[in-house]
Image (cartoon, grey):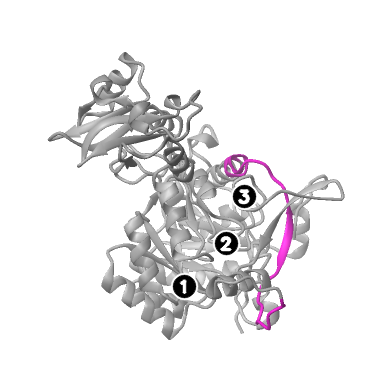
């Protein structure tokens, strides 16, 4: 019978470091074969963890957010679009409207799409631009926007294809916030000072070739191709084929269908064995997600009596994945930055977590107050609450009675943690320390140099600081 180990059962043996400071450690990595990240942190596709706010925050710091699938296709597409439109070198399809709509209609559109300006066009020809300044003190909201917009003859424009540096000079010279880009008399794009500032403020952000933030989205085994087509059209960069038990005939079939129909990287999970890794890689997986039951809100090991302790599961899957250069992400069981160090050193390219990022400002849901303390909700994807939500989405109706549904997860209230940036920053610094202790300068060297030692329960007790609260 095999011995199954988890993160608390092992430590990394310290090695002589070439680094003068942990901040010198390079954390660049891959999520899938073609998706590069600057930090190996990915927020899980859980309904109480990742929508556009979390995905934007993760990508700005160099990581990735996976938009959850527990919504309609239209809602999931909307979340992806919010991320892709949040920042770019050039907005290639700026929102435009006809000149005859009212100020009220234009303002409503701007609020809905979270934009501060609209291009006014007729037959694709630019007529003017409508911004918040144009209606700031306007009392008559029924006026047509052509009466208050800045007309074309007063606009400064540039040729499509202008460099970002030249665009910055024009914006600065004329004290502009928006610069429409024209080609053959038609609007082909828009550069804004806000986007330039965002690019400069987050130089290590994970971006696509157009300067837009990277974003992933999850799909299940129902309506898989329909969802994938819509998400890809919205600009999603990577798909996660997400199942509780991905080593199945149905998962393999859906993976093959996705790879046959679309040119996009597919991360597949969850699995815990070498056999699963072999089968999914042969079916076309571009990344593997490891974790059967290690999550704080997953009860699979208790309910089904099935799973593999997470450190051993990682080692099993990585033994196969590295033969094919397929990246692995470690999903679940991560409580401290030291656990991230162990997962990455063992061979995982990234970690995938809900609990680490739950309870932050960027997660969906309200802040709740109980006994004078602040909390936010955190649901397991196989919890009753998530199942109830999926049923309501499927029927399109509110369901008041309790459903008879099988459950392999729980719901918790987690402490409110503030901005997710603080969490990310602490985790990255911990990882950089781990890289240094492995005598490495980057993640690849860390994996090459890593030496683990198995410890006893007494060794784990000794590892804890007496004044520090350490979860088991």
The reply to whether the C-beta atoms of the residues labelled 2 and 3 are less than 8 Å apart is no
Residue 413: image quadrant is: bottom right
Regarding residue 208, the answer to whether it shows in the image is yes
Q: Position of residue 139 (x, y in %)?
A: 51, 27
Q: Which residues are magenta?
A: 401-425
Instruction: State the residue position of label 3.
Output: 337
Query: Quarter holding the N terminus?
Result: bottom right
Q: On residue 298, which mark appears?
A: none
Q: Secondary structure at mark 1?
A: loop
Q: Is residue 235 left or right of residue 470?
A: left
Name of the residue lying farthest toward the right: 371
Q: Tally the marks.
A: 3
Mark 2 or mark 1: name the one nearer the start of the chain: 2
Q: On residue 220, which mark appears?
A: 1
Q: Is residue 111 left or right of residue 377?
A: left
Instruction: State the residue position of label 2.
Output: 46
Would you place residue 82 above or below residue 181 in this image? below
């Amino acid at each position: 019978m095999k011995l199954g180990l988890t993160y608390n059962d092992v430590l990394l043996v310290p090695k002589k470091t070439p680094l003068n400071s942990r901040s010198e450690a390079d954390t660049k990595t891959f999520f899938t074969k073609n998706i590069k990240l600057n930090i190996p942190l990915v927020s899980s596709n859980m309904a109480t963890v990742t929508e556009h706010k979390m995905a934007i925050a993760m990508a700005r710091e160099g990581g990735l957010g996976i938009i959850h699938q527990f919504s309609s296709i239209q809602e999931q597409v909307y979340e992806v679009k919010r991320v892709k439109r949040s920042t770019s070198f050039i907005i290639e399809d700026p929102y435009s409207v006809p000149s005859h709509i009212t100020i009220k209609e234009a303002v409503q559109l701007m609020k809905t799409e979270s934009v501060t300006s609209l291009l006014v066009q007729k037959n694709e020809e630019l007529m003017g631009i409508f911004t918040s300044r144009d209606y700031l003190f306007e009392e008559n909201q029924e006026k047509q926007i052509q009466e208050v917009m800045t007309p074309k003859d007063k606009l400064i424009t540039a040729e499509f294809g202008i460099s970002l540096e030249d665009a910055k000079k024009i914006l600065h010279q004329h004290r502009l916030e928006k610069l429409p880009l024209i080609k053959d008399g038609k609007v082909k794009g828009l550069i804004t000072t806000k986007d330039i500032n965002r690019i400069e403020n987050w130089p290590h952000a994970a971006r696509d070739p157009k300067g837009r933030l990277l974003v992933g989205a999850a799909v299940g085994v129902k309506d898989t191709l329909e969802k994938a087509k819509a998400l890809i059209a919205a600009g999603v960069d990577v798909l996660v084929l997400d199942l509780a038990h991905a080593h199945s005939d149905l998962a393999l079939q859906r993976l093959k269908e996705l790879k046959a129909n679309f040119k996009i990287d597919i991360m597949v999970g969850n699995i815990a064995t070498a056999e699963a890794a072999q089968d999914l890689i042969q079916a076309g997986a571009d990344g593997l997600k490891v974790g059967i039951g290690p999550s704080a809100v997953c009860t699979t090991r208790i309910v089904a009596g099935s799973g593999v302790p997470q450190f051993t599961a990682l080692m099993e899957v990585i033994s196969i994945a590295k033969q094919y250069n397929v990246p692995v992400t470690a999903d679940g069981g991560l409580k401290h930055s030291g656990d991230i160090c162990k997962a990455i050193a063992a061979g995982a390219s990234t970690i995938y977590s809900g609990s680490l990022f739950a309870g932050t400002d960027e997660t969906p849901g309200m802040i709740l107050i109980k006994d004078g303390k602040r909390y936010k909700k955190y649901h397991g994807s196989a919890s009753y609450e998530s199942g109830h939500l999926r049923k309501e989405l499927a029927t399109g109706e509110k369901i008041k009675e309790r459903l008879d549904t099988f459950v392999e997860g729980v719901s918790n209230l987690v402490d409110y943690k503030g901005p997710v940036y603080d969490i990310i920053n602490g985790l990255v610094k911990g990882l950089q320390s781990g890289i240094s202790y492995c005598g490495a300068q980057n993640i690849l060297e860390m994996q090459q140099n890593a030496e683990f030692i198995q410890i006893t329960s007494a060794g784990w007790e000794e590892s804890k600081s007496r004044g520090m609260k350490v979860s088991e």
